[in-house]
Amino acid sequence: MEELYTLEKEVGRGSYGVVFEGHIAKTGERVAVKRLPCKNAECVELYLQELWAMRATAKNHANIIALHSCLLQTGVRSLKPLKGGKLPLHLVESVLKGSVVGTSSQGQERGSQSNSQQRVNSVSRLQDRTNTLPSTPQRPPNRARKRSSRTEDEQPLNCSALWLVMEYCDGGDLNHYLLSRPPDAQRNHDVVQQLSSAVAFLHHLGIMHRDLKPDNVLVSIQPNGPVFKVADFGLSKMSEGRMDGNLTRKHFSSTCGSDFYMAPEVWGGLTYTAQADIFSLGVMFWAVLERITFLEEGTTQEQLGAYVCKGRWLMPLGEALWENADLQLCIPMKSKRATPLPPPPGLATCGLLSDMLASDPDSRPPADQLESRVRAALKEDSH
């Protein structure tokens, strides 16, 4: 194995996987290690989407989380590095067949029922180990084995989990970073400029994120200031062609994302394009610039996000605009800002936010124009 990683502690947990803080054994470099157990075909499909998108971005943009390597867990304590440009074929087959495919010849001889039970038991044991911070899986000592006519890359493998090794961000997510500090206009402007640049880069590559929100923006503390990075590509989709400008756009139909950041067309169950990402960015930018927060139902953690008040209830902007496309948004929203109050955005920035939050996707600025419009609006308002 080219690199060995030691796991230090769990730093995050979501619906599909667990993230650990770790180190590269040879260099001591701190990394984030994300373990994604291959429990079912749905999970596997999300993992492959995330892996494919992160490989496409690689380390090419400062505001997108960098992927160092991917490893397949092929046994309780063994990992196999996944070579660049390749996907595990049996995991692709799992997605196509709709069930996790076992490739072991011994397992096939035992029959599909026992094979399924073995996979369930194996995954259960591995998950229990993850929950208690497992020791770092390592390749077992070399043993003599019979030669096969197949090359090593062609050997069938049982993959119980994917491990993604990524750069470590020590500032937490955008919610935690901004809300734990007094408001700072320059810092807020940095957020807006850096994220608009990141999304322009993604759309240029034909990648639609589909779940842009403060939780999925990580912060790296650098000597020259914080660097904000788009992360978590589990719901992303890639298009064969570019999606920006006037070129052909890929249409999607599956409803996904987080309620307070979803575009009206997604709320309505319509087909949508990469312009839905621009709406999500608009919600985030508005919330960041004015420090607008809400408490999500069942939680006590403040979240950055703009919304519409409907009686005692908070309604996501996308849902409100789907119900009433002519709804006039009150930008700036001075009455709902969290203390301490930052200065409200200027007229040019408010106009840009209104365009990003348009109910008609074609009225929103495409990503390749957004970055320059952000710079121009902030510059105009600074005077």
Image (spheres, grey):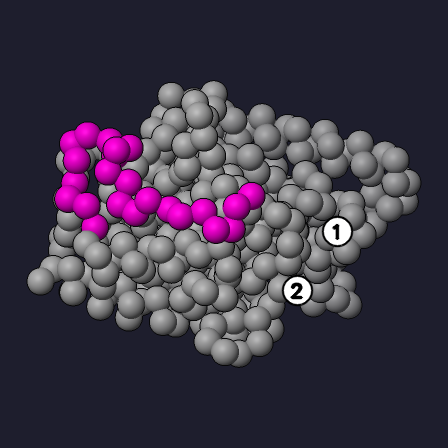
The residues bearing labels 2 and 1 have C-alpha atoms spaced at a distance of 18 Å
User: Which one is in front, 200 or 105?
Assistant: 200
Q: Is residue 175 at least partly visible in the picture?
A: no
Q: Is residue 22 magenta?
A: no
User: Which one is in front, 273 or 357?
Assistant: 357
Q: Looking at the picture, how far across and down is residue 307, in whole percent?
A: 40, 38
Q: Is residue 327 magenta?
A: yes
Which contiguous range is marked in magenta? 323-345
Q: Residue at point 16% right, 40% down?
A: 342
User: Which one is in front, 175 or 297?
Assistant: 297
**Quarter where residue 176 is shown:** top left
Please tell me the numbered disc located at residue 94.
1
Q: Looking at the picture, how far across and down is residue 233, in whole percent?
A: 50, 52
Badge nearest the viewer, 2 or 1:
1
On screen, 181 above or below 222?
Answer: above
Q: Residue at point 33% right, 44% down?
A: 330
Q: Name the residue tied to disc 2.
A: 153
Marks counted in the figure total 2
On screen, 223 above or below 78?
Answer: below
Question: Label 1 crowding class (10 Å Cα cut-off): few <14, some 14-19, many 20+?
Answer: some
| Amino acid type, mark 1 | Ser
